[in-house]
């Protein structure tokens, strides 16, 4: 790792994209905001997103965000399975990891 930027939706993280990043780590994008969708749209082809959160209809991001993921990203199954192999979550939460590459 050469450089790490830690920003949330208050820190205008979207303005850094697509940038020179190979990987974007997105953890629990805020429910009901367009932040997750803006990040996904701003990423360039071949960039990888590592996402932790719930699935569409859960308590993460918006349905539009998940529509962008379905249309513009491919799931990297082996990497996703490896991250989830020992993943533990808090009671009542249904989150998991996904590793996705933008098409």
Image: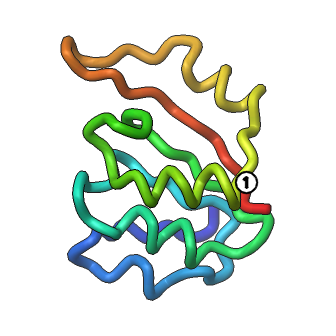
* 59 in relation to 49, above or below: above
In the picture, which quadrant includes the N terminus? Answer: bottom right
Q: Position of residue 37 (x, y in %)?
A: 45, 66
Q: Nearer the viewer, residue 20 or 67?
A: 67
Q: How many marks?
A: 1
- Most extreme residue toward the bottom is 15
Secondary-structure class at tag 1 = strand
Mark 1 sits on what residue?
Answer: 101
Which residue is nearer to you in this view: 77 or 62? Answer: 62
For the residue pair 62 and 15, the one nearer the viewer reads as 62
Q: Residue at x 31, y 35 (%)?
A: 58
In which quadrant will I find the C terminus?
A: bottom right
Above/below status of 78 relative to 61: above
Most foreground residue, 68 or 49: 68
Give the residue displayed 79% in from the left and 64% down from the top: 46
Q: Position of residue 91 (x, y in %)?
A: 20, 12
Write down the quadrant of residue 30 in the picture.
bottom left
Image coordinates of residue 55 in percent, x first then y, are: 43, 34
Q: How is the image coloured?
A: rainbow
- The 10 Å Cα crowd at callout 1, few under 14, some 14 to 19, many 20 or more, is many
Q: Residue at x 64, y 41 (%)?
A: 99
Q: Is residue 76 left or right of residue 28?
A: right
Kindly indicate the quadrant of the structure image that contains residue 12: bottom left
Left or right: where does residue 30 sit relative to residue 99?
left
Point out residue 15 in the picture as x, y percentages from the top left corner.
Answer: 44, 87
The residue lying at 38 percent from left, 48 percent from top is 27
């Amino acid at each position: 790792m050469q450089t790490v930027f830690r920003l949330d939706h208050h820190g205008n993280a979207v303005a850094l994209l697509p940038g020179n990043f190979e990987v974007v780590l997105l953890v629990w994008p805020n429910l009901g905001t367009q932040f997750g969708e803006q990040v996904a749209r701003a990423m360039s082809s071949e960039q990888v997103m590592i996402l932790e959160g719930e699935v569409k209809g859960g308590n993460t991001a918006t349905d539009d965000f998940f529509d962008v993921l379905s249309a513009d990203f491919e799931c990297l199954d082996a990497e996703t399975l490896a991250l989830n192999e020992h993943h533990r979550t808090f009671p009542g939460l249904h989150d998991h990891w996904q590793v996705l590459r933008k098409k």
